[in-house]
Amino acid sequence: MLSQWGFVLVLSAIAVIIPVAAIVLGHFLGPRRPDPIKNETYESGVETFGDTWVQFRAQYYLIGLIFLIFDVEVIFLFPIAVAYQGLSFFSVIAAVTFVLILILGLFLEWRKGALEWD
Amino acid sequence: MNWSDTLIQLQYDLGAPQELSWLVEGITFFVGAFVLANAALVLALLLIWITRKVVSRIQDRIGPNRLGPFGLFQTVADAVKLLSKEDIKPTTADTPSYLLAPVLSVMGVLMALAVLPIGAGLIGTDLNIGVLYLVALGSLGIMAALMAGWGSNNKYALLAGFRVVAQLLSYEIPMVLAMLAPVLLIGTMSMQGLVQAQSFFLGPVNLGVGWFVFLLPGAFLIYFIAALAEAEQTPFDLLEAESELIAGFHIEYSGMKFAMFFLAQFLNSFFLGAIAVTLFLGGWQGPFAGQIPLLGPIYFLAKTFLVYVVIQWIKGTFPRVRIDQMMGFAWKVLVPLVLALILAQMVILKLPLPLWINYLLVLAANLAVVATVLNIMGNYFQSEQIRSKRAFEPKSLIGTMQPVQSSSGD
């Protein structure tokens, strides 16, 4: 069981080494002629104006929150799905109720206008 | 026979001492992971070539045809060129997140290789939570895109980064829920288990055509649409809308750092296709795959490349959608439909009826979902077509030669 994850560990190490090696190689193989204007932030050829990290739409924040709710509930759904064939009647009722609450939550968010993008 | 068992046995046969079993296992894993990861890099070069060829044929061009047979080495030349480019880092960039982002994006994609079943014994490691592992990896790419957008300290990159997060988060929900449907059907998350469940026995012979797509076409359609969005492919490629955001979250990246994002994107669309093949199109199953083991990888790669070409076909033909349409489609169409589908499947599978009637009812629910999704998409494209025709047709006034009636009097 644990040795299965050993492969994932080795693969993750290689998956980090490959891009790092490529970037380091490119860094040393390419020319290096730094220039204050070249190293400026790109903004359609004009000088950068104002601050980048400004306020952003609250909508993105709302979507992030809704995603969080759904993603956590999905994580609960996977174990239910694996064990589903052996579940007793009352467990099935509980699982179905769980999905129903999820659907009700989605419609509540819809009614509240959290899904509108305007 | 699993590939790792074969390799471990080979090392013992060559005289490796039994007490060094951890080293033998480590060498085996290293060899396997190294081969897999490097095969993926070569694959990426091929994928870029396929994309350019398919899209250029759709646009009535020939595409790359100079270097090597059919221009196959064009992407190799491009990679070498990118290697020789200057490595520019903007002075105002947020260094840690700017430098980590390309590494993280490639890592998230390459790690999916661990659970892709290529053949009967050919899977990196058959984790018993394979599907969940893939779901977890999906979030790494989102992190990388946001880090790149934020770290670049560039307004366009930051806007694109926000769009990436909104889009990928929204489409992750229907994608994951669609992946739940086959898991619910057979009750395992192991990728090999899912492939084995898609066999179809005609007497003693396994024809390997019991694909879940025939039983769960609705879940497959929703997975495919969501995977298009997750792969940042054309109907949903708002995050690199050239006319609005120049290049997307990787504007400030040059040379190899840019190549890493490029690599991750192409491999990601291939792997999402491979997951679709594994979950819904039978994986390495096919006629006589059980008798001739070599056929398994051939079936798997053939199906995956076919899905990839279809994705590129869509890339070449579909117009880009607006952001409000895209978000609305995810949350108001796909998520309710896929939740209803899961609920219907849960209820139907527990009905005290013969199994084939249960399966027929599941199929009926899926077909209803397919009809709904196609209907909504058809209406959308029809209205877009009417709108774009109206924009391009000559003004009716020109034909009639009537003087323009001005309402305000000037």
Image (cartoon, grey):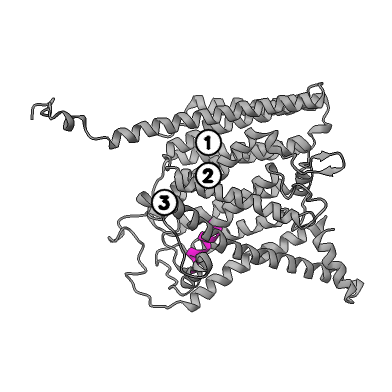
The main secondary structure of the magenta stretch is helix
Residue shown at 73% from the left, 50% from the top: B284
Q: Amino acid at mark 1?
A: Ala
Q: Amino acid at mark 2?
A: Ala
Q: Which residue is mark 1?
A: B330
Q: Which residue is mark 3?
A: B59
Residue B168 is situated, as x and y percent measured from the top left of the image, at 53, 45
Q: Are marks 3 and 1 on the same chain?
A: yes
Lower sequence index among marks 2 and 3: 3
What crowding class fits label 1: few (fewer than 14 Cα within 10 Å), some (14-19), or many (20 or more)? Answer: many
Position of B253 relative to B204 (above/below): below
Lower sequence index among marks 1 and 2: 2
Position of A27 relative to B185 (above/below): below
Q: Which residue is mark 2?
A: B229
Front position in the image: B218 or B142: B218
> Mark 1 falls within which chain?
B
Q: Are marks 2 and 3 on the same chain?
A: yes
> Which quarter of the picture shows residue A35?
bottom left
Which part of the image, by quadrant, shows the N terminus of chain B? Answer: bottom right
The extreme left residue here reads B410
Residue shown at 87% from the left, 42% from the top: B204
What crowding class fits label 2: few (fewer than 14 Cα within 10 Å), some (14-19), or many (20 or more)? Answer: many
Front position in the image: B390 or B330: B390
Given this view, does label 2 or label 3 mark the residue nearer the observer? 3
Q: Check if residue B276 falls in the magenta segment.
A: no
Residue B295 is situated, as x and y percent measured from the top left of the image, at 75, 55
The segment highlighted magenta reads: B256-265
Lower sequence index among marks 3 and 1: 3
